[in-house]
Image (spheres, rainbow, N blue to C red):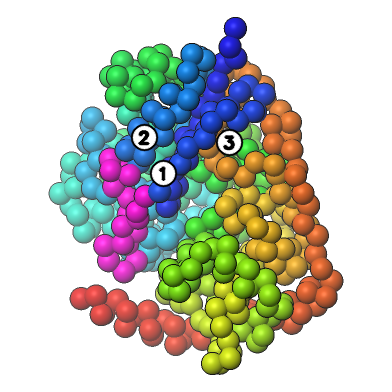
């Protein structure tokens, strides 16, 4: 008899991916689709849930169901970008495009208001995280203030993964991890919605039922089966935020384990035995019951390298090759990678990119390497914040598309002085979705056997010495230019009106 297969689907910022996996973790087929992200105004970042999330899901699912052939699908796991705000009517139909995670900075006024009303210390103590552009609560208040008709019609609060779950099963649920990123609407230690604060942010909106990413939320309905090609009755997990699914895919599960995700944005997740709130980081529930996480996220990383690629019209492989010829320090260039503001640990939506030391002698190799180095300095800054909170990173695991080629991971290791393990599979969150689906149906997968370490990146002492000197100047450059970049950010907003 043919072996059952697990299906994992993840909706990312710039692309969506899917994978078919056996219960032993062998990848049978994979698929991907690129998509566009909308930037309708400065500081606004949105996705059309129907045109992006659902259409990508349909395309990936149909391709992978065909690849399964006669083999039976045992379960489906989903994940997506988050935390996001998608207001929907009582039938789950989106009422506007989804407002994305911390890269969307529209709710600055509402962040200040809620912080003043609830108290900064109280928010960190109860919700685990200070309010920032990552927080969902202020975006609810923004919606009520600026789009009152949409808010009046809103009945359901959906995120990317829970939107897919609702379309597939009709269940109105959200996983605990995603909810714990809806600051200040979730009580971290209580493990439930902070109903009084949720009502203050989104009055009259019923919050979804909370479940864990390792639970089956429902089964594929007859209507969804007809539309997707999935079998009716297929178990569907509750889903979660993509980065936490990706951490599960590489066995980041013990206290001190830390995932470094190289993607459109750089994201770090460290497993904790108990919550450790920090004003410059995010403290959340983990993907598994009874676990917690310390998380950090930069507003841009791969988005900068892609911007450079588009500017010069080259290919990534050629640009990496040019950067590899340049010595550590990029021949005297230093870049602040705050091209879309910065999230942790600065929480400054008006921060902007700075390139210091530029001369006509510098070429694309120096520019590209300076971008990789600037992002690496940001990783070190966040790891130091984690250490200051009491969360020591005992093991770094590198994942994501940026691990390909080896240069970027080597630079991060040289800047931080920490070894990084690179797993055999870096397909990302979709692989973790399949693993979580296996857990949900009681298959008890072994993550280490599913995805063993393929190589270890070790620091070069000579490069470390160079980068220590540059890092000191990197930390000084932001406060030295903050007034100028805030002035320029204000002018950028004015130019759009």
Residue at (23, 53) in percent of width and height: 144
Between circles 2 and 3, the one closer to the viewer is 2
- State whether residue 3 is above or below residue 410: above
Does residue 273 appear in the picture of this structure? Answer: no
Q: Secondary structure at mark 1?
A: strand
Residue 139: quadrant of the picture: bottom left
Q: CA distance from mark 3 to mark 1?
A: 18 Å
**Between residues 487 and 261, which one lies in front from this camera angle?**
261
Q: Residues within 10 Å of mark 1 (few under 14, many from 20)?
A: some
**Between residues 304 and 294, which one lies in front from this camera angle?**
304
Q: Looking at this view, name the residue that lies furthest to the bottom.
A: 360
Q: Position of residue 293 (x, y in %)?
A: 62, 46
Q: Position of residue 157 (x, y in %)?
A: 32, 39
Along the polypeptide, which appears first: circle 2 or circle 3? 2
Does residue 427 appear in the picture of this structure? Answer: yes
Along the polypeptide, which appears first: circle 3 or circle 1? 1
Q: Which mark is residue 33?
A: 1
Magenta highlight: main SS: loop
Q: Which mark is residue 481?
A: none
Between circles 3 and 1, the one closer to the viewer is 1
Q: Secondary structure at mark 3?
A: helix
**Where does label 3 land, which residue?**
432
Q: Which mark is residue 59?
A: 2
The magenta region covers: 35-52
Q: Is residue 182 left or right of residue 39?
A: right
Q: Position of residue 104 (x, y in %)?
A: 38, 60
- State whether residue 51 is above or below residue 36: above
């Amino acid at each position: 008899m043919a072996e059952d297969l697990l299906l994992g689907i993840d909706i990312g910022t710039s692309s969506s991916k899917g994978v078919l996996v056996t219960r032993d973790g062998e990848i049978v087929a994979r698929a991907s689709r690129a998509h566009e992200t909308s930037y309708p105004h400065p500081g606004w970042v949105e996705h059309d849930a129907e045109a992006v999330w659902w259409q990508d899901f349909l395309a990936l699912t149909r391709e992978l169901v065909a690849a399964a052939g006669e083999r039976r699908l045992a379960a489906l796991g989903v994940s997506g970008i988050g935390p996001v705000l998608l207001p929907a009517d009582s039938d789950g139909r989106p009422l506007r495009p989804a407002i994305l995670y911390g890269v969307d900075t529209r709710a600055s006024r509402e962040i200040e208001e809620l912080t003043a009303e609830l108290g900064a210390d109280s928010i960190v103590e109860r919700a685990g995280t200070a309010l920032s552009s990552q927080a969902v609560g202020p975006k609810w208040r923004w919606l009520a203030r600026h789009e009152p008709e949409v808010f009046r019609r809103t009945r359901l609060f959906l995120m990317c993964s829970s939107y897919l779950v609702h379309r597939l099963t009709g269940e109105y649920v959200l996983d605990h991890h995603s909810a714990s990123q809806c600051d200040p609407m979730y009580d971290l230690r209580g493990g439930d919605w902070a109903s009084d604060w949720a009502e203050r942010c989104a009055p009259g909106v019923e919050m979804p039922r909370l479940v864990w990413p390792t639970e089956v939320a429902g089964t594929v309905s007859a209507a969804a089966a007809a539309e997707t090609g999935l079998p009716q009755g297929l178990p569907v997990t509750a889903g979660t935020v993509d980065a936490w699914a990706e951490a599960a895919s590489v066995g980041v599960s013990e206290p001190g384990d830390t995932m470094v995700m190289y993607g459109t944005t750089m994201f770090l997740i460290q497993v904790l035995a108990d919550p450790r709130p920090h004003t410059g980081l995010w403290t959340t529930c983990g993907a598994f019951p009874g676990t917690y996480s310390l998380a950090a996220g930069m507003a841009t990383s791969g988005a900068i390298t892609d911007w450079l690629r588009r500017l010069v019209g080259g290919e990534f492989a050629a640009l990496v090759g040019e950067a590899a010829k340049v010595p550590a320090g990029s021949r005297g260039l230093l870049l602040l990678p705050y091209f879309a503001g910065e999230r942790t640990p600065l929480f400054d939506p008006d921060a902007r990119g700075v390139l210091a030391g530029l001369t006509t002698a510098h070429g694309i190799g120096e520019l590209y390497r300076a971008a990789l180095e600037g992002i690496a300095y940001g990783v070190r800054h966040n790891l130091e914040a984690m250490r200051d909170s009491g969360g020591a990173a005992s093991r770094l695991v590198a994942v994501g598309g940026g691990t390909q080629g080896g240069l970027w991971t080597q630079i991060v290791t040289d800047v931080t002085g920490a070894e990084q393990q690179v797993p055999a599979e870096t397909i990302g969150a979709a692989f973790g979705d399949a693993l979580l689906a296996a857990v949900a149906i009681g298959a008890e997968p072994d993550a280490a056997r599913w995805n063993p370490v393929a190589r270890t990146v070790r620091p070069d002492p000579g490069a470390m010495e160079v980068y220590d000197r540059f890092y000191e100047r990197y930390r000084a450059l932001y406060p030295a230019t903050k007034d100028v970049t805030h002035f320029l950010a204000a002018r950028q907003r004015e130019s759009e009106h």
